[in-house]
Amino acid sequence: MGNFLVWVVWFLAAGGCLATGVAVVNVTNPFFAALALIGNLASLAVLYLLLAAEFLAAAQVLVYAGAVMVMFLFVVAYLGGRADAPWAGGPPLLRTAAVVAAAALLVEVVVVLGLAWGDNLQDPAQVSDSFGSPAEIGELFLTDHLLAFEITSIALLVAAVGGVVLGTTPEKEDE
Amino acid sequence: MVVGAWICLLAPLAGALGITLAGQRISRRTAGWISTLSTLVAFGGALVALFGLWAADPSDREQVSTAYTWLAAGDFEVEVQILLDTLSSTMMLVVSGVGGLIVWYSMGYMAGDDEERRYFAYMSLFVFSMLLLVEAGNFLLLLVGWGLVGLASYLLIGFWHHRPEAVAAAKKAFVMNAIGDATFALACVLLIWETGTLEFSGVFVGVDSLSSTPVNLVALGLLGGAIAKSAQIPLHTWLPDAMEGPTPVSALIHAATMVTAGVYLLVRAHPIFEAAPDIQHLAAILGAATLLVAGAIALVQWDIKRVIAYSTMSQIGYMFLAAGIGAYGYAIFHLMTHAFFKALLFMSAGLVIHHLGGEQDIRRMGGLKDVMPRTHVAFLVGILALVGIPPFAGFWSKDGIIASALATGGALGYTLYVAALVGALFTGAYAFRLYYTVFRGSQSKYAAEHAHEGHGEGPRSMLVPVGILTVLSTIGGLVVIPGVWHPLTEWIGETAEALVDPTVAEDYETSALAVALGLVGLFLARRAFQAGRQLVTSPVIWRVLEHKLYFDELYDALFYRPAVAVSAALRRNVEEPVIERSLDEIGSGTIQVGGEVARVQSGLLRTYAVAIALAVCVLVVVFVAVR
Amino acid sequence: MDGPDIGWYLIVAAMLFGIGALGVMLRRSPLIVLLSLEIMLNASNLTLIAFARQRGDLTGQVFALAVMAVAAAEVAIGLGLIVAMARRRLVLDVDQASALRG
């Protein structure tokens, strides 16, 4: 029974991911695209929960969906009607190549997975209940992966500075 | 005694280095003294070496002293080594002795010149180089000395470098010597190839077992070097031009020592030449040809130094003749006496030139007998020695050579004999023509006007060496008296045994003929002089002789013009279009290719993204496959 | 583990990645391109977390967290760029933004 429930949840979440993904790429209005992405992020959070990554699921919803997407929506609101640009455009060769590339990637990944399914992808490890908990992740961040932690904070600092710089008012000449 | 040889070699080098490093800190006179004294020290060393050798047992008279191994390549080795034997000790004495006298003389001759220090440094360099040449124990070191004397000659001929004629003459001498250097070097290469060594002892032993072609080639290569260095036909055209240098330079380098290096080589390498008799005879024939041609040209020259230069060429022809038929002792004997009287002639001519304020044209001289009595005596002694009038030095040595030609016999021997005798006639003629024109008759107007007043004939530093050489030219030949004693030819014979030995009868018979012919020349010259005309009256012959048998013009047409034309053609057709243009092409081509490649940078985001995606697809396949 | 094997999660992630790639390559509005980029990043996050679960190693989750932080930073800058473009009254079309052409 539990397993069946998991499968149902999985299908719903996976379907939601893919559907919202296609929606982001396909809609014309950027506002709706942003909303679709929020849906995508939420579905992904569900999938993370199924994979015993509770902290990450929470972070996803809080940070990604909560902060980043809100920022997006702010900008979309600011830009208003000017953000519209037609879907189709560019040389046909480019479009064909793009589709081919994406399809090829997908096929390759599936092939590799297929090849490895029998060996590497069997028997997921047994994990304790605290797997994926904030405590464990925090401990890792401060011991084994301290460097990554620090560098990430530097990256964020750089982004903050860059954001400020980009946000400065342009010169009066083209006002 | 080997120590003496080392001192002899290194003293002039120390002198040259000392003068060079001291630079302007020493006075010009001091530079002169350093040079002179270092050469005299060398002479002392040579004496020590000689006496040591003399006192030693005759079987012990070949001493090799090695300083260190210079280069080694597998089995092949070359060491810095000197060879002290009878031949090299004699040469050392001649070079350092006559050299010392000439350097001393230069102190007076070159006094007042701005660049005296450079001159004396070069002179010491030359003395060192020549000593290295004669003391070398292997062919490579000899070649080093060979090249260095060529360098010193170039530097000294072109000493007055603001004179374009001097610079041109220096270049000509160097280039022609370079031809000889090249053949010499090729001969050395062949020797290494065939015998595996360049040491004299090793080569001379090994050369017996070689077949005729390599031996002939080696001998030919050595001969090429010798004829370039000694200014024999066909590589002789540089010597008259070399008179652009200062007179002591002409005396030392182009009379007494450097030009005799070729003779030394022929005697030193005699085993090689004896194994290649055709080449040895070729040397004799070239010598005979040169002595005749040079003697003839000397009859029409107006420059006092050029007459003496052609005389040098002619006398070295005698030495080549001797070495070519195997009369090594007489060749070296004549080398020695020639050094005495030729240096004497040049130095007395230098006194005349100095007295007349630089004039060298004999048409402007005359009647100097009363004005410069001591110089007159010296010059006359030199002329008598040159012509070979007994008892002066040249008589004993030159007649020994001619008698050896007679003793050789056969077609070659008799031809050389006749040529040598005719040469004696020419020698008498041109020598006395010179003497009479310069010293006898009435004083020319020019001489009277331009005479260097109030100094006497010259400073002591110039007169004393001339005096010494006068004495040597008088008695120096008495070391070999046929039928009585031959210490010198025996001494040389220990290293290079003569192939021919004239009998006493042949000696006296030849001497009589030669002296007679010399006196005939004297009378012809005197008669012509008193009649106020030249010896050569036919204008055609005069013109040919004046142009030195058109050798210069021939070489110009054969070598110089084609070389210049080829160079110009190459420059036009290869250098500019191909090389220069290709460099430009590389530059512009790179820019062009860069432009093409830059078109990939379209600036369009989507293109980049597609490109990256495609690349990733390919890479995935690669990574999966490689794993 | 309950539910599908890890492989299915990976397939979902691959499909998401492909969709996001298509969006980046085919849309002309920079905003939509950024959104598609986010989809791609999330797909790789999913892969990381799936493998972390499979191997029982939390390193994958730590990595995913770092990716999230960097993605946030990158979006901030990207949006800043778009706003700057809009302020200068440029057309928001990636095909027209070719000032970096070589």
Image: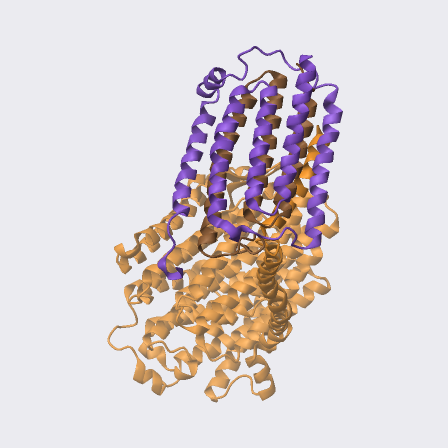
Chain colours: A purple, B orange, C brown
Q: In this view of the protein, can residue B477 be seen by the observer?
A: no
On the picture, is B355 further left or further right than B244?
left
Does A168 sit above or below residue A24? below
> Which residue is more in the foreground, B511 or B19?
B19
> Which residue is more in the foreground, B423 or A57?
A57
Q: Residue at x 31, y 78 (%)?
A: B371
Q: Residue at x 72, y 39 (%)?
A: A103
Q: In the image, residue B536 lies at what x, y percent?
A: 56, 84
> Which residue is more in the foreground, B501 or B32?
B32
On the picture, is B305 further left or further right than B290?
left
Q: In the image, residue C97 lies at what x, y percent?
A: 54, 54
Farthest residue in the left direction? B454
**Location of the C terminus of chain B (image quadrant):** top right
Q: In the image, residue B381 lies at what x, y percent?
A: 42, 69
**Location of the N terminus of chain B (image quadrant):** top left
Image-quadrant location for residue B175: bottom right
Q: In the image, residue C80 lies at what x, y percent?
A: 45, 45
In this figure, what is the number of numbered marks? 0
Does B348 sit above or below residue B475? below
Does B36 sit above or below residue C46? below
Image-quadrant location for residue C22: top right
Does A56 sit above or below residue B80? above
